[in-house]
Image: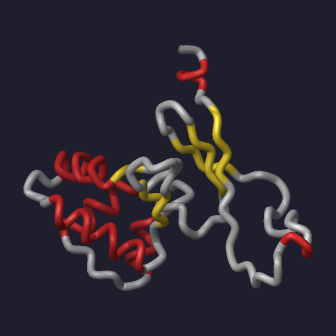
């Protein structure tokens, strides 16, 4: 089982797993998964040919609302969906092809922000995005 265990979490919550919802969750389940809605639809169609784009979009919206999937936006590209919602992590993004990897830097990014740089904010979450070129793009 991967870091995400999405299907297991959804079952544990008693979320009604229709055939369509199950297929979307199966497509998303796994490590380093960051598909766009269109990619989720294309992969879901391979498993369930009759699944509609609207159903995929609605299911993704529900999963985000439930807090089981995170929407990741990078540099004006299409939103991607990350099932690794329950493990603190940051993202490594290729500036050329848009590939995204989950990374787990040592240290606490929240603790790294000095009090005088918080401007009185009560900070609840931190998102750090590392950008660079993936090995394929760097050698191209």
Front-most of residues 15 and 131: 131
Looking at the image, residue 57 sits to the left or right of residue 136; the answer is left
Q: Eyeballing the image, is 15 above or below 90? A: below
Question: In the image, what residue occupies the spot 82% across and 78% down?
Answer: 119
Q: Position of residue 51 (x, y in %)?
A: 13, 59
Q: Position of residue 103 (x, y in %)?
A: 67, 49
How is the model colour-coded?
secondary structure
Q: Quadrant of residue 117?
A: bottom right
- Tally the numbered discs: 0
Looking at the image, residue 55 sits to the left or right of residue 79; the answer is left
Question: In the image, what residue occupies the spot 33% across and 58% down?
Answer: 26
Q: Position of residue 12 (x, y in %)?
A: 43, 80
Q: Position of residue 87 (x, y in %)?
A: 63, 65
Question: In the image, what residue occupies the spot 67% across and 45% down?
Answer: 130
Front-most of residues 136 and 23: 136
The residue lying furthest to the left in this view is 50
Question: In the image, what residue occupies the spot 77% across and 52% down?
Answer: 105
Front-most of residues 110 and 10: 110
The residue lying furthest to the top in this view is 140
Front-most of residues 30 and 51: 51
């Amino acid at each position: 089982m991967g870091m995400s265990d999405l299907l297991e979490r959804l079952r544990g919550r008693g979320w009604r797993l229709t055939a369509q919802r199950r297929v979307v969750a199966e497509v998303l389940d796994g490590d380093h998964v960051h598909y766009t809605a269109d990619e989720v639809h294309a992969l879901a169609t391979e498993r369930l040919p009759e699944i509609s784009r609207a159903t995929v979009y609605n299911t993704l919206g529900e999963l985000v609302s439930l807090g089981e999937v995170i929407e990741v936006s990078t540099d004006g590209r299409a939103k991607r969906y990350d099932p690794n919602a329950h493990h603190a992590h940051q993202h490594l993004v290729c500036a050329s092809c848009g590939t995204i990897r989950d990374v787990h830097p040592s240290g606490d990014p929240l603790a790294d922000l000095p009090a005088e740089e918080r401007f009185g904010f009560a900070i609840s979450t931190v998102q750090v995005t590392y950008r660079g070129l993936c090995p394929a793009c760097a050698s191209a």
